[in-house]
Amino acid sequence: NMEIGTFAANGYGEAFAGAAGYQQISLWGAFATEAVLTFVFLMVILGVTDGCHENGKLAGLAIGLTLVLIHLISIPLTNTSVNPARSLSQAIFSENACAMPQLWLFIVAPLVGAGLAGLAYKAIMCECKCCKKD
């Protein structure tokens, strides 16, 4: 007999404290965790895939190791989203009644983090020679 339980769903607060090893984290703590880690992930992706800097050969390694680090940090906190599609699929099948009502955070926070990463990367890289048009 298999139990689904939280089924790798993302969550925060008392409803998820102790479930699958989660630490109790507040709504704003979960939001900050997801937004900041998504920001970091996207900055790495943008940095290593930017054709301007010849990082293509090690891009997969850099992206993969960054994702491992992100998971090591956030699995005990929110069970790691950084991807709204991953959060949606797990919330649908979770037996935890709070998974669906908390889903909005795991859609909005990664979108905020990704948007800020795009803006920050553009602002930083516009100072680079290869980004300037002749």
Image (cartoon, grey):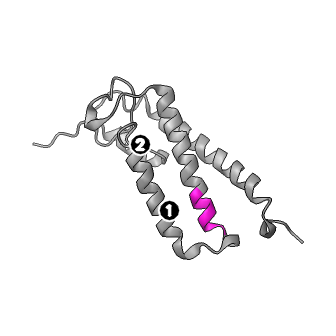
User: What residue span does the magenta drawing correspond to?
Assistant: 44-50
98, above or below 64, in the image: above
The mark nearer the N terminus, 1 or 2, is 1
Q: Residue furthest right?
A: 134
Q: Are marks 1 and 2 in contact (CB under 8 Å)?
A: no
- Give the image location of residue 79, x and y in percent: 37, 41
Query: What residue is at 61 percent from the left and 67 percent from the top?
Result: 49
Q: Residue furthest left?
A: 1
Instruction: Give the class, few, some or many, for how many residues have Cα within 10 Å of label 2's Cα (few <14, many ≥20).
Output: some
The residue singled out by tag 2 in the image is 74
- Give the image location of residue 89, x and y in percent: 38, 45
Secondary structure mostly taken by the magenta-highlighted segment of the chain: helix
Instruction: Give the class, few, some or many, for how many residues have Cα within 10 Å of label 1's Cα (few <14, many ≥20).
Output: some
Q: Nearer the viewer, residue 104 or 122?
A: 122
The residue singled out by tag 1 in the image is 63
Element carrying mark 1:
helix
Query: What residue is at 39 percent from the left and 36 percent from the top?
Result: 77
Residue 19 disc label: none
89, above or below 11, in the image: below
